């Protein structure tokens, strides 16, 4: 093992050192697979014997398996190591204000079965009971997908992920709600919860770990609300009270429309799906966007109408695009990210709205290079929020703690 300063030994128990080495090994196998024990030892900067012991334990627990035999110029041919994602699955849950979506994935976040959805029950007790019933039914239906490793849940609101609590989900009216415990008790499975924007950012971080450009980025998810995840220096920013990155509730105009959080003129109140649709119906947004309008028409419908020549639909999308870019200007000025990701239904119209978003961004950004910050659109068909939810279960054993 590499030399560890004496003072660190006092705080790191044998158990934590082992856990850290295990995570480092799993992460290196995941990013370099197939990989031999000798190469793993070299990458970990440790003795071959110590790595063999560690790999033996990972094979015993079923996290790693040995695959094909490789070629060696001389001596014994090495067998390659792989992460074992077979016969294990994860349930991903995306709670939105109007509907809740559920997807089953493998351990690396690939979709294994079709996505199901149902209306989101506002009463927390009824919501938990309903979700437990549905997840159990899905797991019975998909027994062939293997043992479920846990359930990852993303929430449209502020979350204390360590405590498993929803601190505040304005559009659902949930406050200080312990969501993890009753779900875990009902399902008999590990459950992790996270804010939707932060979960998307974590999934992106996990997928691109090691890429230099992706250690400073912002992830926006535009749906019933506006979720934002901020990653700086390769770490998700949570802040002191788990509300860091809530740009959705930074005002664009204090005299603006009423937001679900109770304040007026929040960025979210200008760019959420319900705001876009309300705009299409010519409703004065100062009255507050009305969820009833959402049930009649979706943003996907609106995009289809815009493509079909409906000028009012295109105008509603372009107005949202302008507000999206103006708010993004504030985010860029505050965070100065290397990259911005945008997910959500409105990205289906990216070819129609991109120029407007970029013009508004460069209008507000403080320098021309900041105004040209690269933006990548994450298509809704790839279910970024559900992949974020899956990563809550699949990623921690690989991705947490960059110690090496
Ligand atoms: Zn607000």
Image: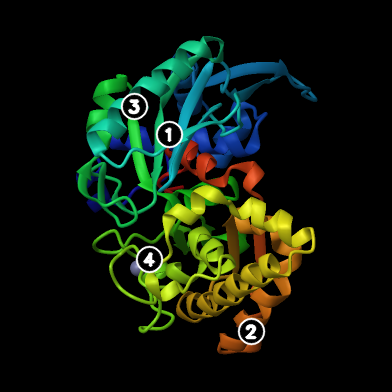
Point out the tag, 1 or 3, that comes first from the N-terminus.
3
Query: Which label belongs to residue 362?
Result: 2
Residue underneath mark 3: 130
Q: Is residue 189 above or below residue 196?
A: above
**Would you identify the image quadrant in which residue 334 lies?**
bottom left
Identify residue for label 1: 393
Mark identifier at residue 342: none
Could you say which is closer to the camera, residue 268 or residue 85? 268
Q: Residue 250: x and y, percent?
A: 38, 75
Q: Are marks 3 and 2 in contact (CB under 8 Å)?
A: no
- Between 150 and 20, which is closer to the camera in this rendering? 150
Residue drawn 78% across and 22% down? Answer: 71
- Which of the two marks, 3 or 4, is nearer to us in this view? 3
Is the residue marked by circle 4 packed among few (<14), some (14-19), or many (20+) residues within 10 Å? some
Question: Which residue lies at the image location 30% right of the left edge and 72% below the top edge?
Answer: 263
Q: Secondary structure at mark 1?
A: helix
| First in residue order: circle 3 vs circle 2 | 3
Residue sitting at x 73%, y 75%: 355
Q: Residues within 10 Å of mark 3 (few under 14, many from 20)?
A: some
| The image quadrant in which ligand 1 is located | bottom left
**Secondary structure category for the residue under label 4:** loop
Give the Cα separation between the discs numbered 3 and 4.
Answer: 29 Å
Give the vertical position of 398 relative to 82 (above or below): below
Q: Earlier in the sequence, mark 2 or mark 1?
A: 2
Judging depth in this view, the residue of 239 and 215 nearest the camera is 239
């Amino acid at each position: 093992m590499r030399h560890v300063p004496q003072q660190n030994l006092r705080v790191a128990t044998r158990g934590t050192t082992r856990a850290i080495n295990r995570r480092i090994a799993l992460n290196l196998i995941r990013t370099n697979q197939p990989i031999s024990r000798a190469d793993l030892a070299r990458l970990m900067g440790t003795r071959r014997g110590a790595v063999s012991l560690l790999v033996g334990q990972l094979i015993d627990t079923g996290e790693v398996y040995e695959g094909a035999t490789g070629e060696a110029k001389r001596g014994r041919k090495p067998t390659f190591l792989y992460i074992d994602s077979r016969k294990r699955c994860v349930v991903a849950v995306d709670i939105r204000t109007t509907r809740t979506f559920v997807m089953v994935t493998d351990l690396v976040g690939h979709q294994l079965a079709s996505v199901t959805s149902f209306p989101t029950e506002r009463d927390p007790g009824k919501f938990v009971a309903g979700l437990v019933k549905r997840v159990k039914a899905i797991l019975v239906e998909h027994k062939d997908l293997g043992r479920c490793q846990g359930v990852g849940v993303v929430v449209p609101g502020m979350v204390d992920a360590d405590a498993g609590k929803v601190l505040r989900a304005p559009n659902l009216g949930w406050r200080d709600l312990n969501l993890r415990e009753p779900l875990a008790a009902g399902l008999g499975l590990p459950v992790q919860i996270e804010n939707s924007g932060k979960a998307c950012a974590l999934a992106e971080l996990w997928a691109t770990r090691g890429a230099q450009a992706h250690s400073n980025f912002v992830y926006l998810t535009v749906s019933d609300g506006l979720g934002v995840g901020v990653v700086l220096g390769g770490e998700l920013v949570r802040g002191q009270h788990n509300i860091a990155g809530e740009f959705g509730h930074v005002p664009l105009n204090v005299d603006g429309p009423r937001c679900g959080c109770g304040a007026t003129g929040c960025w979210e109140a200008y760019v959420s799906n319900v705001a876009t649709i309300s705009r299409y119906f010519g409703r004065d947004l100062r009255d507050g966007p009305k969820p009833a309008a959402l049930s009649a028409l979706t943003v996907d419908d609106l995009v289809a109408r815009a493509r079909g020549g409906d000028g009012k639909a295109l105008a509603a999308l372009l107005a949202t695009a302008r507000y999206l870019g103006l708010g993004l200007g504030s985010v860029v000025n505050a965070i100065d990210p290397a990259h911005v990701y945008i997910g959500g239904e409105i990205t289906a119209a990216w070819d129609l709205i991109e120029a407007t978003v970029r013009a508004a961004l460069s209008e507000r950004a403080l320098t021309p290079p900041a105004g040209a910050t690269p933006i990548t659109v994450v298509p809704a068909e790839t279910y970024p929020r559900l992949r974020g939810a899956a990563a809550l279960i699949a990623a921690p054993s690989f991705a947490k703690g960059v110690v090496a």
